[in-house]
Image (cartoon, rainbow, N blue to C red):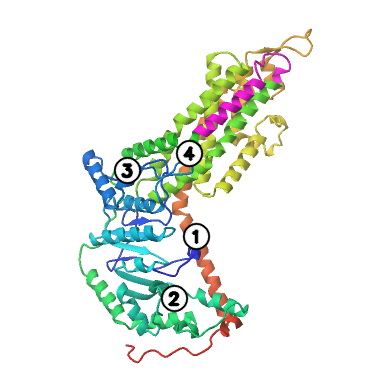
Amino acid sequence: MNKAGAGTANAFLSGTILLNGRKANLSFGAAAYVTQDDNLIGTLTVRETISYSARLRLPDNMPMDEKRALVEGTIVEMGLQDCADTVIGNWHLRGVSGGEKRRVSIALEILMRPRLLFLDEPTSGLDSASAFFVTQTLRGLARDGRTVIASIHQPSSEVFELFDRLYLLSGGKTVYFGQASEACEFFAQAGFPCPPLRNPSDHFLRCINADFDKVKATLKGSMKMRFERSDDPLEHIMTSDAIRRLFSYYQHSQHYLTARQRVDEMARVKGTVLDAGGSQASFGMQAFTLTKRSFVNMSRDFGYYWLRLVIYIVVTVCIGSIYLNVGTKYNSILARGACASFIFGFVTFMSIGGFPSFVEDMKVFQRERLNGHYGVLAFVISNTLSAMPFLILITFLSGTLCYFMVRLHPGFMHYLFFVLCLYASVTVVESLMMAIASIIPNFLMGIIIGAGIQGIFMLVSGYFRLPHDIPKPFWRYPMSYISFHYWALQGQYQNDLVGLVFDNQDEELPKIPGEYILENVFQIDVSRSKWLDLSVLFGMIVIYRLLFFAMIKVSEDVTPWVRGYIARRRVQHRRREAELAMVRTPSLRGYVVDAAPELPADHP
């Protein structure tokens, strides 16, 4: 239990990790970690969630019956048998309760029977009954021989009574470490007894959290706080002084000596350092399981692809009715160009709508990756393969409706090129948005950035401004060539116009061949094959997927170093400011009313 708040995200920690008194690295799989947020796949049931996790981490040669037995045993151990076949729940599916979600998160990590389990605020956001049940479950895990370490900020008195040992931190310093039942006696001996009718955990946090000084000084300065006589020892002493006294008292207490002696004893025992665990499944099993799980999630989540499919069909029917049987009249030349530009622009732009689902996938990945469930490459491959059937369905259905209603260039190969080009364009945008989701976890920011990138690419696609008229510096070279809209439109224009003959503006004038229109109206090089344009699009799919993979790896390896460097610079700056600040602020200086009481005579 510590007094850290939301500001710890900007903190910088340095030091040495010791396991049983010896240096070690907490690499993936060395210890299980349950995050504060329950990032779970909402469309899966509790049993499916745990089963997929078992397949991702258990050895391939382990019989399936043993895997099922382990899954069922974990469900019973966490008390989830009553909701085992209930979905987790999301925005459109009613699922399990908050306490049951928390127990599912814990079940996923104890599946591999780790000896060391970390939990970040396991009772946060839960009601009192759910918090007590979760803590009671953790107590049961500890009774089975596991070491359970949980950070809890404001436990109720019932939850506090379940603790075996209590570890109090303030400003990175140990204020108390020992039996939870002996903490009240320790604080009383240090001169800070717990007042009657106060929750002991609240009293401990009141003693070690210096933020109370700022609040009381502010209230006193604004005359909004009445100071009444109280038996609280903190009424006449600053919390920072209380922290120093508690720290000094602990350094000379029997609790400190006992802890040091215990660490020294464990350090002398051989074979007690945890070995790195993680997943024992093969790469192929991980990729297959992730692909299957992702496909099931996409098929059950209405907002992932099904809603987009409905919108695509409705809009393409509208496009087909507006450009119905466009023909080969003179005015159909620009109509065909506008139709192709809109269909490719709209279908690709709508892919941005899947960004919230991509962000949820990344949250699940980051939680599972943190505990070594699988590798980055397996995740990228599975994400690509699982989305492929849905993207094919979307593009072929909407593309077929549009193609035959508008009656574009007849012929099966022309139709096949159109839907393949549409599929490649949508897949490129999906890959781009996944790459954005890997570094930007905010829904709104990701959608805005994705829309901005698409808007720029559409601007240089060759329709709103003809290719030869686009300014060469930057916009034509290289922007138009890295725009997937440019290659999609270039290929579709050739696919639709080559081989057709259009009426002239004057019926007495000769007909206009499609090749002439391509070169002189749309400024397209007809010597370049349309299949080359399609190949470039598929090449962009590979490039963006590799970019997606690289961004995840950079986020894992480089981002922590950059954050650490920034944090170190911030700490150095604050230290320089502290050295220049030679006096206290008036509000805090005037807060101390009476002198602090002396330490007890029996202080060691």
Tell me the residue at 31%/56% (across/down).
30
Q: Earlier in the sequence, mark 1 or mark 3?
A: 3
- Mark 4: secondary structure: helix
Give how far apart the Cα atoms at labels 1 and 3 are. Answer: 38 Å
Q: Which residue is mark 4?
A: 545
Q: Residues within 10 Å of mark 2 (few under 14, many from 20)?
A: many
Q: Earlier in the sequence, mark 4 or mark 3?
A: 3
- Mark 3: secondary structure: helix
- Mark 1: secondary structure: helix
Give how far apart the Cα atoms at labels 2 and 1 are. Answer: 28 Å
- With 41 as the anchor, is 165 left or right in this view? left
Give how far apart the Cα atoms at labels 4 and 3 are. Answer: 31 Å
Start-end of magenta stretch:
306-333
In terms of depth relative to the viewer, which is nearer, 219 or 361? 219
Closer to the camera: disc 1 or disc 3? 3
Amino acid bearing label 2 = Ile
Q: Which residue is mark 1?
A: 563
Q: Which residue is mark 3?
A: 47
Give how far apart the Cα atoms at labels 3 and 2 are. Answer: 42 Å
For residue 107, above or below residue 86: below
Q: Earlier in the sequence, mark 2 or mark 1?
A: 2
